[in-house]
Amino acid sequence: MSSSTQRPSPRRPYPPFWEKSIPFILALVGLAVLALILISLAVLLGWLK
């Protein structure tokens, strides 16, 4: 029983849309975290002064 059915390769030449947008989302999250950290540091410095 040898079935010679050609299965479609799971690896597609082009990645899905969400895979393309992952780096942009990570960059936006990183920038938002950095902005929050900078704002919190500025607030703490303002309170200490």
Image (spheres, rainbow, N blue to C red):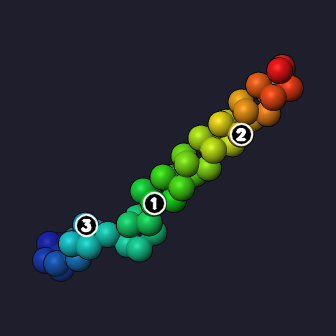
In this rendering, position of residue 42 left or right of residue 23: right
Image-quadrant location for residue 47: top right
Q: Residue furthest front?
A: 49
Q: Which mark is residue 11?
A: 3
Of mark 3 and mark 1, the one earlier in the sequence is 3
Disc 3: CA contacts within 10 A as few (<14), some (14-19) or many (>=20):
few
Q: Amino acid at mark 2?
A: Ile
Kindly report which numbered mark, 1 or 2, lies closer to the viewer in this rendering.
Answer: 2
Which residue type does callout 3 highlight? Arg
Image location (x, y in percent) of residue 19: 40, 64
Residue 10: percent from left, percent from top: 28, 69
41 shown above or below 21: above
- Quadrant (top left, top right, bottom left, bottom right) of the N terminus: bottom left
The reply to whether dot 3 and dot 2 touch (C-beta < 8 Å) is no
Residue 24 - label: 1
Q: Is residue 23 above or below residue 10?
A: above
Q: Residue 38 lies in what quarter of the image? A: top right
Question: Which disc, if any, is residue 4?
Answer: none
Which of 45/31 is in front? 45
